[in-house]
């Protein structure tokens, strides 16, 4: 798994040097939150009620954009074959790419939370449980997104196809994540929110296992 | 036996690119793959590498494989040093990357985006020497190389012959005659 | 590695399933329309005889797609892919039937055709997943990649089936809970109604089997034409 970590860090380095991809995601994300805030504001109550939904809609779109980056540079530079020719299994490529996605998504969700706190009056004192929800939700999302990004890497028109496929598959994850976030914002006791966390964790485990097992099968040949 | 193809055929959509081809390669052999454009040389190399699956037939490999595409594929945002270090780490190898760069006359810290196509070819050779696979699959390795680069390529192929097997696709019949023990001619299907 | 030659015509089983299914369909409808009205819902409950078998067969069809997608990925035989494809397509039809009958029932009962409650939402998602399955198939030209990508959707998408089935329990949804609970084996239904329902379920299953075999045959003929 050292290779996976190394691959994730290398991709992070490449992405930072490439800039274009990351900047477009960030810009899109910021603009989206601002427009939502303008559209739903300025009263505090509706903004606060809309916050969990807005947060997850923005995150879902941003992570879909981001997921196309998982293999984008690999395809542009034609280096995907090199990775697949490394002796041994191919799972490490999946885990490396997933880790890379998570390394981008986690700071992005933290940023999203801060922006939503500022624009939509999300309660800052709930930061820890909300961030846990964000982490669980993005992991479920990214595990499927990485898998599909790999599968469709060589396909033309993947930018259109990927969101289409992803959204229908990960709606359960987004749904439970929104519910958990909404519960936290409404001030429900943690024990009630915990059942959503459990569900999210189950999704994460199922999607992660299935994707990791299927990835080598679909990538060969 | 390093590589064995048993009656393989490959089809893209409706078109057969290769039909009923059998081939075997041992260590210490260099085989040149000849044929006009569109005769399926690159496809055959990719099949040998395991990057494509044959529509029919079997491919067996006994060893580590590297495939050098034409043009060579590198991450343009990395420097030559970084690229070789990552390659070594992924393949679990240990080698003198600095020596390899010096030998092929390449700068360490220039991003690969600034490399000319000849320099990329040289880097590809350096990478092959460094990773030392058992089976070398080279797609038109001689293109874009200058006279000195060509000399280096000939040397590299001689070194590869010690213990590894090489298949190289080329349009350069002089090169093929010079380095290859056998040739395999593909026709347009 | 296509084995054997594909027959041009449906075999005996296909004809038998289809014929028997079509023959018994009017009988099933008769039983449904002569079943006693429900205590609370009156005659409206009769839509259940189409709704429940439709939903069940939809779930079953997606399960078959899941199974054959797995088989395809591990055996790489296009025949498995064709069954997965056929089952997904027929499953969509049955699921569509369940959605439409559900909406027709919801209008007089809940006052609206559609509401975003868990069962309906998860079922709509399920429907969308398998619509995505066909969009994906249509978008990929290379047959092998198409089959692989579709198989992946067939496997990962199936996780929505248990979610959809269990949603009425997990989320205390507006949709009523199962009358025949497959997880506990409890049945909450009058015997006459149960008979009519089970009969319709049988008819739908026969039709499902017949149509899947027919559709897989058509897919095989298509593949042969594509390869020729």
Image: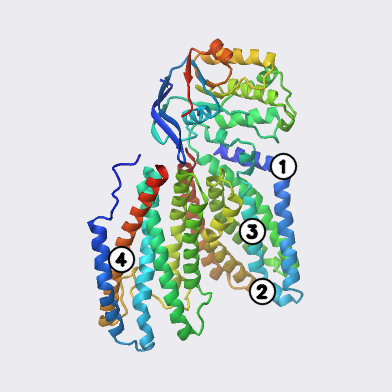
Q: Of residues B156 and A137, which is closer to you in this image?
A: B156
Mark 2–mark 3 distance (CA, rounded to whole Å): 20 Å
**Residue beneath label 2, please?**
A49
Q: Earlier in the sequence, mark 2 or mark 3?
A: 2
Per the model, the C-alpha gap separating discs 2 and 4 is: 48 Å
Q: What is the C-alpha distance between the residues marked 3 and 4? A: 41 Å
Q: Quadrant of residue B102?
A: top right
User: Label 4, on which residue?
Assistant: C207
A50 or A196: nearer the viewer: A50
Q: Are marks 2 and 3 on the same chain?
A: yes
Q: C227 and C106: which one is in front? A: C227
Give me the disc on residue A18: 1
Q: What colouring style does the render use? A: rainbow
The residue lying at 54 percent from left, 43 percent from top is A94
Q: Is residue C10 above or below residue C43?
A: above
Q: Spatial distance from mark 2 to mark 1, Cα to Cα? A: 38 Å
Numbered label attached to residue B151: none
Q: Residues within 10 Å of mark 3 (few under 14, many from 20)?
A: some
Percent position of residue C118, x then y? 50, 72
Q: Residues within 10 Å of mark 4 (few under 14, many from 20)?
A: many
């Amino acid at each position: 798994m050292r290779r996976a970590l190394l691959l994730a860090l290398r991709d992070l380095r490449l992405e930072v040097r490439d800039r274009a991809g990351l900047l477009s995601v960030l810009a899109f994300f910021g603009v989206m939150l601002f427009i939502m805030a303008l559209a739903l504001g300025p009263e505090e109550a509706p903004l606060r009620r809309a916050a969990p939904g807005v947060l997850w809609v923005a995150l879902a779109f941003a992570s879909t954009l981001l997921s196309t980056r998982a293999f984008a540079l690999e395809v542009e530079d034609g280096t995907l074959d090199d990775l697949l020719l490394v002796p041994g299994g191919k799972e490490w490529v999946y885990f490396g790419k997933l880790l890379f996605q998570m390394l981008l998504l986690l700071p992005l969700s933290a940023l999203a939370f801060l922006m939503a706190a500022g624009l939509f009056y999300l309660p800052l004192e709930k930061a820890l449980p909300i961030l846990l929800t964000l982490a669980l939700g993005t992991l479920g999302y990214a595990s499927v997104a990485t898998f599909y990004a790999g599968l469709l890497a060589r396909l033309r028109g993947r930018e259109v196809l990927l969101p289409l496929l992803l959204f229908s598959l990960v709606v359960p994850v987004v749904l439970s994540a929104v519910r958990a976030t909404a519960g936290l914002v409404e001030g429900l006791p943690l024990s009630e929110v915990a059942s959503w966390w459990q569900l999210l964790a189950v999704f994460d485990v199922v999607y992660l296992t299935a994707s990791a097992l299927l990835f080598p099968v679909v990538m060969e040949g | 036996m390093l590589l064995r193809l048993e009656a393989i055929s490959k089809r893209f959509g409706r078109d057969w690119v290769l039909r009923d081809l059998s081939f075997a390669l041992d260590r210490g052999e260099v085989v040149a793959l000849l044929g006009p454009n569109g005769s399926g040389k690159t496809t055959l190399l990719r099949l040998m590498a395991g990057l494509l699956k044959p529509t029919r037939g079997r491919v067996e490999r006994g060893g580590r494989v590297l495939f050098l595409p034409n043009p060579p594929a590198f991450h343009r945002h990395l420097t030559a040093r970084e690229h070789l270090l990552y390659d070594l780490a992924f393949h679990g190898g240990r080698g003198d990357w600095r020596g390899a760069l010096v030998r092929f006359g390449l700068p360490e810290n220039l991003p690969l985006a600034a490399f000319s196509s000849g320099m990329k070819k040289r880097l590809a050779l350096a990478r092959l020497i460094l990773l030392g696979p058992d089976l070398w699959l080279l797609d038109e390795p001689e293109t874009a190389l200058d006279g000195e680069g060509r000399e280096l390529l000939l040397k590299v192929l001689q070194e590869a012959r010690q213990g590894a097997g090489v298949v190289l696709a080329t349009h350069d019949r002089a090169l093929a005659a010079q380095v290859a023990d056998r040739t395999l001619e593909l026709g347009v299907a | 590695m296509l084995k054997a030659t594909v027959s041009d015509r449906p075999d005996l089983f296909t004809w038998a399933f289809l014929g028997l299914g079509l023959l018994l369909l009017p009988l099933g409808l008769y039983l449904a329309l002569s079943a006693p009205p429900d205590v609370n819902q009156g005659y409206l409950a009769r839509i259940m005889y189409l709704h429940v078998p439709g939903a069940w067969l939809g779930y079953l069809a997606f399960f078959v797609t899941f199974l054959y997608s797995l088989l395809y990925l591990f055996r790489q035989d296009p025949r498995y892919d064709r069954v997965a494809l056929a089952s997904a397509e027929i499953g969509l039809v049955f699921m569509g039937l369940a959605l439409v009958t559900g909406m027709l029932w919801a209008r007089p009962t809940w006052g609206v055709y559609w509401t975003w409650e868990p069962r309906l939402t998860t079922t709509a998602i399920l429907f969308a997943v398998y619509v995505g399955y066909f969009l994906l198939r249509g978008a990929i030209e290379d047959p092998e990649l198409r089959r692989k990508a579709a198989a992946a959707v067939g496997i990962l998408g199936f996780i929505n089936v248990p979610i959809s089935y269990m949603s009425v329990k997990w989320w205390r949804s507006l949709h009523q809970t199962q009358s025949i609970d497959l997880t506990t084996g409890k049945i909450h239904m009058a015997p006459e109604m149960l008979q009519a329902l089970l009969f319709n379920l049988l008819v739908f299953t026969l039709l499902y089997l017949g149509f899947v075999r027919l559709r897989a045959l058509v897919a095989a003929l298509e593949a042969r034409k594509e390869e020729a």
